[in-house]
Amino acid sequence: MSAALRLREDYGARELRVQARVSRDADQTRRLLALAAIYEGASRGAAAAIGGVQRQTVRDWVAAFNAHGPAGLIDGKAPGQRPLLNPEQRQVLRRIVEAGPDPAVDGVVRWRLIDLAQWIFAEFGIAISKQTLSRMLRQMGYRKLSARPRHHAQDLAAPAVFKKALPPAWQRSPEATRQAGR
């Protein structure tokens, strides 16, 4: 059994209760109140009962509080999974997307997600799904855009025949015209 950790000397029960009152984080408030009970002389078991946890967890709270103060009792954001492509690989991907495919070498006239996923696997040996690649490209500032298809024999002047000549969208109302003439 390890020795009990001592709490910091620069705080007291009253300061922790004030911090708990102004805190917007419910978990931090619960932890602060449990530590305030320890400052008042309660046992670690009693503080664990106040916090609704085991004594080992209270010991962890004490260690975090001693190291970082009340801010150490706020849960941090989990780091998440490591990105599939490192920054250098992302730069290479950015250059490939910007340059566009070479039909003779790549066998495609425009990049699709599946084509880029195959290129990444061939280049880096990393298998990546279309969904993950789409999310990654979106984070890099790219959007999925495709041109409106046009028939190769379409007459460019033909659509102009069907367009209507509409009056200007903003016109003065008859009331405003009469008032302006006065």
Image: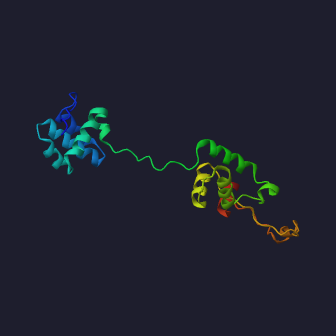
Residue 36 can be seen in this image: yes
- Residue 182 percent location from the top left of the image: 68, 54
Q: Quadrant of the N terminus?
A: top left
The percent position of residue 14, horizontal first and vertical second, equals 17, 35
Give the residue at x 65% y 62%: 175
| Residue beneath the point at 75% across and 59% down | 110
Q: Is residue 28 left or right of residue 132?
A: left
Q: Is residue 169 above or below residue 45?
A: below
Where on the picture, by quarter, is residue 155? bottom right
Front-lying residue, 173 or 10 = 10
Q: Residue at point 11% right, 37% down?
A: 41
Q: Which one is nearer the viewer's eye here, 5 or 27?
A: 5
Q: In this figure, what is the number of numbered marks?
A: 0
Query: Visible in this render: residue 172?
Result: no
Question: Where residue 23 sits in the image (x, y, percent)?
Answer: 28, 43
Residue sitting at the far top: 10
**Residue 8 at what x, y percent from top left?**
22, 30
Q: Quadrant of residue 42?
A: top left
| Colour pattern of the rendering | rainbow
Q: Nearer the viewer, residue 141 or 166?
A: 141
Q: Nearer the viewer, residue 147 or 2?
A: 2
> Looking at the image, which residue is at 82% across and 72% down?
162
Name above or below for residue 10 compared with residue 37.
above
